Each structure stands twice: as C-alpha cells, then as structure tokens.
Image (cartoon, rainbow, N blue to C red):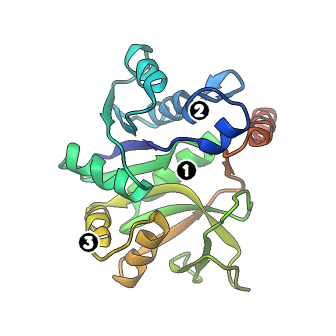
Amino acid sequence: MKMEYAIIAAGEGQRLKDEGFPKAKPLLTLLGVPMIERLINIFADQGAKSVFIIINEKNIELHEFLVTHEFSIPIHLLVKNTISSLHSFVALQEAFPKWESCCLTTTDTVFDPKTFGLYIKEFQQGNMDGLFAVTPFVDDESPLYVTVDHDKRIVCFSDNKYSQSVFVSGGIYCLRKDAMQAAEQSLAAGNHRMRNYQRFLIDRGLMIKAYPFEKIVDVDHLHDQETAEYFLLEQKIRS
C-alpha cells in the first residue's frame, strides 16, 4: 500500500512571535534542527519517497528554507492561506489528488521516532480507516480528550475530560481513502476545525483506532522548546 506523508505548516505561530521568536514556528530548532526538517527526516527514515507540505503566503522565510535547503527526499510545496488545519488538509488533497492513504502531522508535534515507526507499521498492517496517535501526556492549552474501547477503537472525542478519557489527541493521523475524503465532507457539513472533523469520522461510523505514544510534546511557546529538547535527549539516552 502506497502511503503519502504530509505536514500542515500553514499557521502563523503568533504565540511564539509574541514571545520574541522572529521566525516561522516550523523553523524553531530542537537540538539544532528545525522542527520541520526533523519531521521530514523521520518520514524519510520510514521509507517516504517525498513529503507534501502546506505553508501560508506570509511565511517567506519558511518558503525560502524549504525551496533552497537540501533534504534527503523531495518535497512538494503548496503555498496557500487557510483558516484552519482542516482547511489545509483539504487544500493538500485538492492540490495533490490520488492519495491512497496518508500520514498527516502538524509541524509542532514532537515524538519518539522509534514509536512512530511502530505506529506506521501497525497502520500499514491493519484494516482500520484511520489510526490516530494519542498520549496520556497532556501538553496542550486546549487538549482534545480521547475515549477508546477495549480494542482501542475511538468512541469519543471531547473538549472535556471524562473518567474514561485517559488519552489526548497527539496531532498525528494515519488515514485511508474513506477517512481522507471525509475531510471535505466535514467542511461541507459546516465543521471548520480539525477536532470536529475527527468527531465527524466517528459519527460516520468509520473505524478509527488509537495508537498510544508515551509522550507527544506540542510546541506552542518558547518554554515548550526546552520541554521537547529534554524529551528528545531522554529518548537518546534510552536507546
């Protein structure tokens, strides 16, 4: 099964700018490597032949980095202003059609590459419509709580924590065709946020399963950089 890899990097990173970081969020470095380059390298290690990336028109410095930097695999770049991650995902599918399946991430998601490899393998060997990364580590200002059944099938996404919700969404999504096509259907139904698209998948009866990661760090503020780097150093020591 051919799988594409995609990165949503179309946000403005306003919180980092307000805290004094002068560049686009994807260029924030972790252990000396820009976050977006780190993701591309991880995807390449999993056998990706290329990576699809969407950025907004304002991120001129990010655009220059992506078109001039020498990566280990080719990138396909879409420059378009969008109002949400869901709109960005739909725009990617419209610009680059015929995806059979994909792994989609946001640019500020920091995770253990080894766990990610096991996650990709489980998705490729399974028959679910989607496999979403989840984590018990809550590191988000507005977490999306995830409730699963005994077989790790997701039964509920919630903005509020319930007693059965031991995980939060990690911002990494593996999707097959029906789940990908549902993104545009979700927009047509009036949903304009990624979390509402996730709920839409459950409401439609698609089989969406959860894959637990021990920790996924979401980088929104400058202090998150230190948290993410400490986490990555911990992983290096373990391995």
Residue at figure coordinates x 49%, y 68% from the top left:
195
* Element carrying mark 1: helix
Residue type indicated by callout 1: Leu
Q: Residue 45: which numbered mark, if any?
A: none
**Which residue is at the front of the view, 190 or 101?**
190
Per the image, the residue denoted by label 1 is 118
Is residue 1 visible in this depiction of the protein? no
Query: Mark 3, mark 1: which one is toward the viewer?
Result: 3
Give coordinates of residue 212: x percent, y percent: 63, 62
Q: Give above or below for 202 relative to 48.
A: below
Where residue 39 appears, x then y in whole percent? 53, 35
Residue 137, quarter of the rendered image = bottom right
Judged left or right of residue 182, residue 138 is right
Q: CA distance from mark 3 to mark 1?
A: 34 Å
Q: Which mark is residue 188?
A: 3
Q: Position of residue 130 (x, y in %)?
A: 41, 65
